[in-house]
Image (cartoon, rainbow, N blue to C red):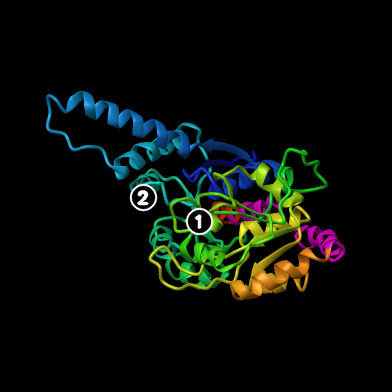
Amino acid sequence: MNGRPLRILLVHPGASWSTADVEAGLRYGLKAHGVEVIPYRLDERITIAGKFLHVRWRQLRKTADLPKPNKVDVVYHASVGALEMAMRRDVDVVVIVSAMLFHPDVILMMKRAGLRVAIVFTESPYDHAEELRVARLVDGCWTNERTMLAAFRAVNPHAGYLPHAWHPETHGGAMAVADTVPRHDVVFVGSGFPERIAFFNAIDWTGIDLGLYGSWKGLGLRRRTLAYVKGPTIDNHFTAALYRRAAIGLNLYRSRDSQRRPVRGESLSPRAYELAACGAFHLSDERAEVQEVFGDLVPTFTSPTEAAALIRLWLRDPAGRARIAAALPATVAEASWIHRAGIVLADLTTLVHSVWVA
């Protein structure tokens, strides 16, 4: 490094929604610490690779017996450019966010070329089996779920716990919200996993202005509940504006992994930090860190029946909501992406100067 700032190739997760927000936040935080960050936009490269491979296949299939490109082919071609970019820019370390859409063969080639590779995992405990498989391949990693830390350290001794965070430019401070942003009684932004579908279907929303944003259509919502779906997946800036305008925000955790097996985590989701940083009163599923971080400032529930009762109770108490909302930002004041990037930077510096150089 010769006294210069750490130079990192930061690989985008490939997906365009919540994991992309992690990459944007980490990039912002690392730059705030003076790190030279070189972004690798895996999402854009997946789009380009898919189009290119399918165009070439259609051109050549008339004269050659070629298999149609599949998702693995696309992911490989989108990922392999990271190896070239890392070598050309002479980076100190490659940091991959999520890695669920990054081809593992490219990680192996990076290691073979002498590159240092670390992964910020974002999907524990829901995709833990795949994450653990990839964690074996890299020099270091972080998990977003503290109950998974021992499992990660069993396959990679340089694993750490990196909680989620909020973005200072999106969620911090008293930001103005346009009057065009809808003002809902209750708002939820997220994907329609089966347990969430069941939750919203089980509540009588009569008399409540519910705003559901994200991917919900065609997933099993009853007609009466489907009427509350207001739009497709939205960016984090609009989400923050919705939180600030709503009377009540909802934070729902998944209860099953990607194989539909029951799981129960303890760590806060990005939504929990973002709602609090926005100063948005909200209700949440029970989780260990909810009580540890927020105390009694975030009322919790264990069933749709309890949630419905809390919603109607707090809708009748605007003064109580305002009092709690004003206290929430202080609870996550040291949980921004600037603070989280400091953890990542300290770990990477230790690894670069000790383990990887030894």
Q: Which residue is mark 2?
A: 104
- Which mark is in front, 2 or 1? 1
Amino acid type at image mark 1 = Arg
Residue 320 or 38: which is nearer the viewer? Answer: 320
Which label's residue is closer to the chain start, 2 or 1? 2
SS at mark 2? helix
Amino acid type at image mark 2 = Pro
Q: Residue at x 38, y 43 (%)?
A: 113
SS at mark 1? helix
Q: Which mark is residue 223?
A: 1
Note whether 287 is above or below 93 in the view shown.
below
Q: CA distance from mark 2 to mark 1?
A: 42 Å
Q: Magenta segment range?
A: 318-347
Magenta stretch, overall SS: helix
Note whether 54 is above or below 169 in the view shown.
above
Q: Quadrant of the N terminus?
A: top right
